[in-house]
Amino acid sequence: MDNLFETINKIISSPLWTLALYVFLFFLVVFWLVLVFWTFKDARKRIDDPVIVGVAVLSSLVLPYMGTLVYTILRPAEYLSEARERELEMRAMEQELQTLRACPSCGGIVRPDYLACPNCRRPLRAACSHCGRVLEPGWKLCPYCGRDATQRRVPPPGSRDSERGGEDRGQFEATLSEGKQPSLAEAE
Ligand SMILES: [Zn+2]
Ligand SMILES: [Zn+2]
């Protein structure tokens, strides 16, 4: 027994042991400071309020390891950038919903780039004969290719169209079928 205590005593009092102890303490302190820095970086990404970020960093500085542990339990689950992205997506969806319009004839939902209502066949817009993109009823030329768009214009929905719908629909369908073969029109 005495022998065992002697060896333990020897080990503890040896300079190597002291050195090992200091190295261990040094790494403990370094790891603690790294945790404080990590808390600061992480809190800045998740928390908007600088005061709360300061409290989080201070708690992980004053309470080594424990403060960081408490912070990781209490921190917001989402990054600020993710929250902003989600908000932007929501706004984009809202805007898209706002651009959806109701068909003047049947009230069905039509997108702004629809040429005709898919529900009741009512013509809504014309397509450019050169580039094929959708033109708004009031446009004098195609803003996408710069060509004159007056020949291919369809009356704006709800104006004369309702009075002489059949005629205009016929015209519109004619222009539509023209638009499907732009190579023929250009060859002439
Ligand atoms: Zn319709
Ligand atoms: Zn065009």
Image (spheres, rainbow, N blue to C red):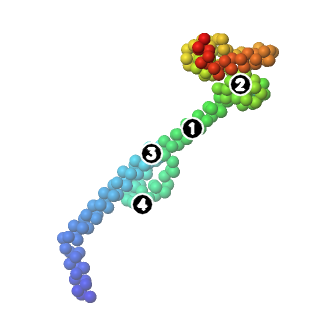
The residue pinned by badge 2 equals 116
Element class at badge 2: loop
Q: Residues within 10 Å of mark 2 (few under 14, many from 20)?
A: some
Residue 71's x, y, as percent? 45, 55
Q: CA distance from mark 2 to mark 4?
A: 65 Å
Foreground mark, 2 or 4, reads 2
Element class at badge 4: helix
Relative side of 21 to 152, left or right: left
Residue 118's x, y, as percent? 73, 29
Residue 150's x, y, as percent? 64, 11
Determine which quarter of the picture holds residue 129. Answer: top right
Foreground mark, 2 or 3, reads 2
Instruction: Return the disc, 2 or 3, that comes first in the chain's sequence.
Output: 3
The residue pinned by badge 4 equals 66
Which of 20/55 is in front? Answer: 20
Determine which quarter of the picture holds residue 20. Answer: bottom left
Q: CA distance from mark 3 to mark 1?
A: 20 Å
Instruction: Return the disc, 1 or 4, that comes first in the chain's sequence.
Output: 4
Relative side of 156 to 7, left or right: right
In the depicted structure, whether residue 5 falls above or below residue 120? below
What quarter of the picture does the N terminus occupy? bottom left
The residue pinned by badge 1 equals 89
Instruction: Report if the CB atoms under discs 1 and 4 are less than 8 Å apart.
Output: no
Q: Cβ(mark 1) to ligand 1 < 8 Å?
A: no
Q: Which mark is residue 45?
A: 3
Instruction: Return the disc, 3 or 1, that comes first in the chain's sequence.
Output: 3
Indicate the amino acid at tag 2. Answer: Ala
What quarter of the picture does the C terminus occupy? top right
Instruction: Report if the CB atoms under discs 1 and 2 are less than 8 Å apart.
Output: no
Q: CA distance from mark 4 to mark 3?
A: 21 Å
Indicate the amino acid at tag 4. Answer: Met
